[in-house]
Image (spheres, helix red, strand yellow):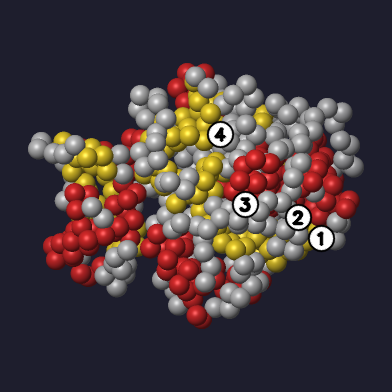
């Protein structure tokens, strides 16, 4: 499969990858037809999807079966008036049908808008209105369907409501009941061009309202490097990525790149995360490749990993937030596997990564993915030297890189703010070492200026995370009359440390940071909390902590 889309399909070094990565771009590329249906023809009995849940259910689906199911779903959606260019919101949790419906909508040339099941009525109205959503396909979860129905009167563009499950409420079409009545699928004469919009994500909004990130049909191809090279997948791989289907990380790790590689996507559908339960699933099904945010690894390493047979596990990756070196070291100590970090945004595919032919540096995001021209620039727009901190940017020439977003939909001003003068500005800060590895510092808005020093929150968080008491933490700046700002740590303690929260532990954590990193970076304020404020996609909302502190609440 990969040879259809790359002029060179394997690489042995950074130089080889940087010099020879070149895509073969067909006209009117459509992932559902040009990848998945081809697999159905060439490897019909290959296992495409292995879906399980926390109730013991299991579905094994071959590429040939998946083609049949996606054709049937596409035909059914056509009967509901859904076609080329129609915006369709999916709120399906990790239900098996999410994978089927995603591919079906690609076959119709519709615009897919994946969304999390945690949206409120207000969130749904906002998305329906901003994107002129035509149809909503959701799980029959009582909370989800109630919020969708509450949003109905304020969502005039939505003409079709479909629910999937055993208890479909009034007001929704019953997907499972009606799909069997659909006629045989006939592929539309003209489905899409490469430039048409295929997918839109509403960003999680660490500050402000969510933005609508629009991707074209080549975005799927942009994830070939994600699955084949970063995840290091191949036919026979069984890959598990921990991600809700409402997040961009789902198509990073549970969809496009994995199926380019011909791997099996493993899904564990569960209501509440539990490290022991997840590890038991990995053990039972012999997962070979695993990807999760560092938060998941933090909980995993607090388990006794010797109790699980993880001998099938060959490769582990992480993205979604910066990886603390202490987590890398502990996981390697317990498993012998080095986590390979990657970096990207909702607006991109993987822009920086640690590839199989590289030696990972704990805490580093790796090197630029060769499909992007990445640089670091200072506030005045000049390039950074090695060791200097700056903003990560993508240099965009005459042709948009494969995987970079089209625009912030219906917001030209916001698009121009982020993408101008040949640069896409990520808003993320980093520095580059002498070997070309990038090291995350934080969002531009999160950098703390204290007594003339610029302090990135991640470096202090990494220091704190090496203390055994700390499960999670967030570093922010608090206004100070003398220093301009002082460093504050908001800390979630391990359960065995909660009864020790107090002045003595504060001093211990402060001294610990002084020993691990430069003394001027230590947190002068430490607050213990039960949980950190996060977006619905799980990212820490430091802006919320700063807002609370600005009101004088500690």
Q: Earlier in the sequence, mark 2 or mark 1?
A: 1
Q: Residue at x 59, y 48 (%)?
A: 14
- The tag on residue 46 is 1
Cα gap from disc 1 to disc 4, whole angstroms: 36 Å
Q: Is residue 212 above or below residue 514?
A: above
Q: Nearer the viewer, residue 163 or 432?
A: 432
Crowd rating for badge 2 (residues with CA inside 10 Å; few <14, some 14–19, many 20+) = many
Query: Is the residue marked by circle 1 packed among few (<14), some (14-19), or many (20+) residues within 10 Å?
Result: some
- 263 left or right of 549 in image: right
Q: Which residue matches tag 3?
A: 13
Q: Nearer the viewer, mark 2 or mark 1?
A: 2
Q: Estimate the spatial distance between the alpha carbons at disc 2 and disc 1, rounded to whole Å.
A: 8 Å
| C-alpha gap between disc 3 and disc 2 | 23 Å
At 85% from the left and 61% from the top, the residue drawn is 45
Question: Mark 2 touching mark 1, by CB under 8 A?
Answer: yes
Circle 3 Cα neighbour tier, 10 Å, few/some/many (<14 / 14–19 / ≥20):
few
Extreme-left residue of the structure:
482
Label 4, label 3: how many angstroms apart (C-alpha)? 18 Å
Q: Are marks 1 and 4 in contact (CB under 8 Å)?
A: no
The Cα–Cα distance between marks 4 and 2, rounded to whole angstroms, is 28 Å
Q: Could you tell me which secondary element the residue under label 3 belongs to?
A: loop
Image x and y of residue 281, in percent: 60, 70
Q: Earlier in the sequence, mark 1 or mark 3?
A: 3
**Residue 499, placed above or below residue 533:** below
Q: Which residue is mark 2?
A: 262
Residue drawn at 53 percent across, 28 percent down? 395
Does the residue at mark 1 contact the one at mark 3 (Cβ under 8 Å)?
A: no
Labels 3 and 2 touching (C-beta < 8 A): no
* Mark closest to the chain's N terminus, 4 or 3: 3
């Amino acid at each position: 499969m990969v040879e259809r889309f790359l002029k060179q399909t394997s690489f042995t070094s950074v130089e080889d990858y940087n010099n020879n990565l070149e895509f073969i771009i067909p006209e009117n590329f459509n992932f559902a037809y040009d990848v998945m249906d081809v697999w159905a023809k060439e490897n019909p009995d290959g296992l495409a999807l292995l879906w399980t849940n926390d109730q013991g259910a299991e579905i094994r689906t071959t590429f040939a079966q998946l083609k049949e199911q996606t054709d049937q779903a596409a035909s059914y959606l056509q009967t509901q008036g859904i076609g080329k260019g129609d915006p369709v919101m999916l709120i399906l949790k990790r239900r098996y049908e999410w994978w089927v419906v995603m591919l079906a909508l690609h076959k119709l040339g519709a615009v897919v808008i994946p969304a999390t099941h945690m949206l409120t009525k207000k969130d749904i109205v906002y998305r329906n209105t901003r994107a002129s959503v035509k149809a909503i396909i959701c799980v029959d979860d009582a909370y989800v369907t109630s919020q969708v129905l509450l949003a109905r009167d304020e969502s005039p563009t939505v003409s079709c409501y479909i629910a999937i499950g055993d208890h479909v409420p009034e007001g929704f079409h019953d997907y499972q009941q009606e799909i069997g009545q659909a006629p045989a699928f006939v592929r539309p004469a003209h489905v899409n061009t490469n430039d048409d919009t295929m997918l839109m994500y509403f960003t999680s909004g660490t500050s402000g309202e969510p933005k609508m990130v629009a991707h074209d049909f080549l975005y799927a191809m942009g994830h070939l490097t994600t699955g084949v090279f970063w995840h290091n997948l191949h036919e026979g791989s069984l890959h598990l990525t921990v991600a809700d289907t409402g997040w961009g990380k789902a198509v990073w790790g549970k969809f496009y790149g994995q199926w380019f590689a011909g791997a099996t996507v493993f899904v564990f559908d569960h209501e509440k995360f539990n490290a022991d339960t997840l590890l038991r699933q990995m053990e039972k099904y012999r997962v070979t490749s695993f990807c999760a945010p560092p938060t998941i690894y933090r909980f995993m390493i607090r388990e006794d990993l010797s109790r699980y047979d993880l001998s099938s596990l060959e490769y582990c990756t992480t993205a979604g937030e910066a990886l603390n070196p202490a987590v890398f070291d502990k996981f390697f100590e317990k498993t012998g596997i080095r986590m390979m970090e990657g970096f990207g945004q909702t607006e991109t595919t993987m822009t920086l990564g640690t590839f199989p032919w590289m030696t990972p540096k704990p805490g580093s995001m790796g090197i630029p993915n060769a499909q992007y021209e990445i640089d670091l620039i200072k506030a005045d727009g000049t390039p950074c030297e090695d060791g200097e901190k700056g903003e990560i940017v993508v240099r965009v020439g005459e042709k948009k890189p494969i995987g970079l977003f089209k625009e912030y939909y219906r917001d030209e001003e916001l698009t121009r703010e982020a993408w101008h003068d040949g640069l896409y500005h990520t808003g993320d800060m980093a520095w580059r070492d002498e070997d070309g590895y990038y090291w995350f510092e934080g969002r531009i808005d999160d950098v703390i200026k204290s007594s003339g020093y610029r302090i990135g929150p991640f470096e202090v968080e990494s220091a704190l995370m090496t203390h055994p008491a700390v499960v999670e933490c967030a570093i922010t700046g608090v206004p100070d009359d003398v220093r301009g700002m002082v460093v504050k740590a908001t800390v979630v303690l391990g359960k065995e440390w909660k009864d020790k929260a107090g002045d003595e532990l504060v001093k211990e954590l402060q001294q610990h940071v002084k020993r691990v990193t430069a003394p001027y970076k230590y947190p002068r304020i430490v607050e213990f909390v039960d949980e950190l404020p996060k977006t619905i996609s799980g990212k820490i909302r430091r802006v919320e902590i700063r807002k609370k502190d600005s009101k004088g609440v500690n």
